[in-house]
């Protein structure tokens, strides 16, 4: 199955989505395909209702709850910022 996800106002199509595919897998797939790193959130919007999709959530299962109105659901990928990587600084040991 295919999912349409907007990123920067441009609709993208994610192919190969199954009942087992998680939000995290879709986000990683999109980020890798676009060559972008960082932290992302997938948002689901239905009319005036908007929510963040959890990383372990199975998207087809969640979208299935909308029934025939699923076509009105919009998925949008938002970049929250760069990856947070802590840098370790090695300093020489001082002897007394």
Image: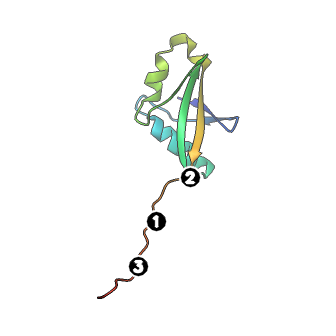
Q: Position of residue 96 (x, y in %)?
A: 29, 88
| Circle 3 Cα neighbour tier, 10 Å, few/some/many (<14 / 14–19 / ≥20) | few
| Circle 2 Cα neighbour tier, 10 Å, few/some/many (<14 / 14–19 / ≥20) | few
Mark toward the viewer: 2 or 3: 3
Q: Which residue is mark 3?
A: 91
Place residue 44 in its image quadrant. Answer: top right
Cα distance in 3D space between marks 2 and 3: 27 Å
Secondary structure category for the residue under label 2: loop
Residue pictured at 48% horizontal, 30% vertical: 53
Viewer-proximal residue among 94 and 79: 94
Q: Which residue is mark 2?
A: 82
Viewer-proximal residue among 94 and 11: 94
Q: Position of residue 6 (x, y in %)?
A: 64, 33
Residue pictured at 45% horizontal, 23% vertical: 62
Secondary structure category for the residue under label 1: loop
Cα distance in 3D space between marks 3 and 1: 13 Å
Viewer-proximal residue among 73 and 94: 94
- Work out whether mark 1 precedes mark 2 in sequence or the reverse, and give the earlier one: 2
Q: Position of residue 31 (x, y in %)?
A: 57, 46
Cα distance in 3D space between marks 1 and 2: 14 Å
Place residue 91 in its image quadrant. Answer: bottom left
Q: Label for residue 87?
A: 1
In the image, residue 88 above or below residue 94: above
Residue with the most extreme right position = 9
Is the C-beta separation of discs 3 and 1 under 8 Å? Answer: no
Residue with the most extreme bottom position = 96
């Amino acid at each position: 199955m295919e999912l349409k996800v907007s990123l920067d106002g441009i609709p993208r199509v994610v192919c190969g989505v199954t009942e087992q595919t998680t939000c995290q897998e879709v986000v990683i797939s999109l980020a890798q395909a676009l060559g972008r790193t960082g932290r992302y959130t997938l948002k689901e919007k239905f009319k005036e209702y908007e929510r963040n999709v959890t990383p372990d959530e199975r998207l087809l299962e969640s979208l299935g709850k909308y029934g025939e109105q699923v076509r009105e659901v919009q998925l949008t990928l938002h970049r929250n910022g760069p990856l947070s990587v802590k840098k370790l600084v090695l300093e020489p040991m001082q002897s007394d």
